[in-house]
């Protein structure tokens, strides 16, 4: 083979490789993602500005891990009665919980003007671990600290994590066990089970 033919063959192979990489990236760009939208708490609050007062109160506590356990959580749910609510039970040590946090970040911003999102930080050994995790993966709503796991079990009827509970405005409940694979799937379930759409 002459040097010119080798150069042409090498250039052709390089172009084919670039084309293949471009096609792979293009094909993957439409796939659902649970990656965080990379918004700060301030940006989330800005996007959710003008929400009804009960929801605005949740947004004002975004990223907080609140004390009070089951009693405080039940009081918050009573105040939200008549509204669609999504509760996510999670823990900072739970890898499946971590994998779905991007979906909750996106859904809580996209649907947070009409749906109340609340977290239960269940069975974390310290609030500091939960707060450190939420600094890395912020969401537009607070979580209630549940070191014993009692609140998480009482609300989700499950000892597992993650678990998501949907309440529609009439108080009907749907429980989803396991992590959400994408924000798209979570948002579909919010519409189906919380908004009754």
Image (tube, helix red, strand yellow):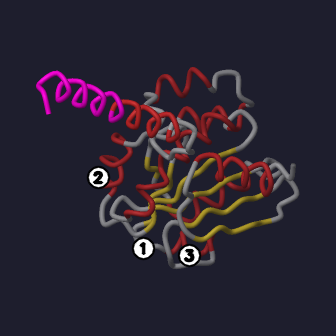
The crowding category of the residue bearing disc 2, from other C-alpha atoms within 10 Å (few below 14, some 14 to 19, many at least 20), is few
- Residue ID at (60%, 71%): 177
Residue located beneath label 3 in the image: 153
Report, in whole angstroms, how far the alpha carbon at label 2 lies from the one at label 1.
15 Å
**Which numbered disc covers residue 148?**
1
Nearest the viewer among 135 and 106 is 106
Q: What label does residue 60 carry, if any? A: none
Label 1: few (<14), some or many (≥20) within 10 Å? few
Q: Position of residue 2 (x, y in %)?
A: 13, 27
Badge 2 element: helix
Q: CA distance from mark 3 to mark 2?
A: 22 Å
CB contact under 8 Å: marks 3 and 2: no
Quarter location, residue 121? bottom left
**Residue 58 x/y as whole percent:** 60, 39
Q: Nearer the viewer, residue 13 or 21?
A: 13
Is residue 8 in the magenta section?
Answer: yes
**Residue 136, image x and y in percent?**
34, 41
Say which label, 3 or 1, has the lower sequence index: 1
Mark 3 surroundings: few (<14), some (14-19) or many (≥20) residues within 10 A? some
User: Position of 181 compared to 190: left or right?
Assistant: left
**Magenta part of the protein: which range?**
1-17
Residue to which mark 2 is pinned: 128
């Amino acid at each position: 083979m002459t040097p010119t033919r080798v150069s042409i063959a090498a250039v052709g192979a390089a172009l084919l490789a670039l084309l293949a990489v471009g096609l792979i990236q293009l094909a993957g760009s439409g796939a659902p993602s649970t990656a965080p939208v990379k918004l700060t708490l301030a940006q989330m609050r800005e996007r959710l500005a003008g929400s009804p007062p009960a929801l605005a109160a949740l947004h004002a506590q975004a990223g907080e891990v609140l004390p009070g356990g089951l009693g405080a959580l039940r009081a918050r749910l009573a105040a939200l009665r008549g509204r669609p609510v999504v509760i996510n039970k999670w823990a900072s040590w739970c890898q499946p919980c971590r994998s779905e946090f991007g979906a909750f970040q996106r859904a809580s911003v996209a649907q947070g003007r009409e749906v109340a999102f609340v977290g239960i930080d269940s069975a974390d050994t310290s609030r500091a671990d939960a707060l450190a995790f939420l600094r890395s993966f912020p969401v537009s709503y607070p979580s209630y600290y549940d070191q014993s796991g009692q609140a998480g079990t009482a609300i989700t009827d499950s000892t597992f994590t993650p678990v998501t509970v949907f309440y529609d405005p009439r108080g009907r409940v749907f429980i989803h066990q396991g992590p959400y694979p994408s924000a798209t799937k979570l948002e579909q379930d919010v519409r189906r089970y919380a908004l009754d759409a």
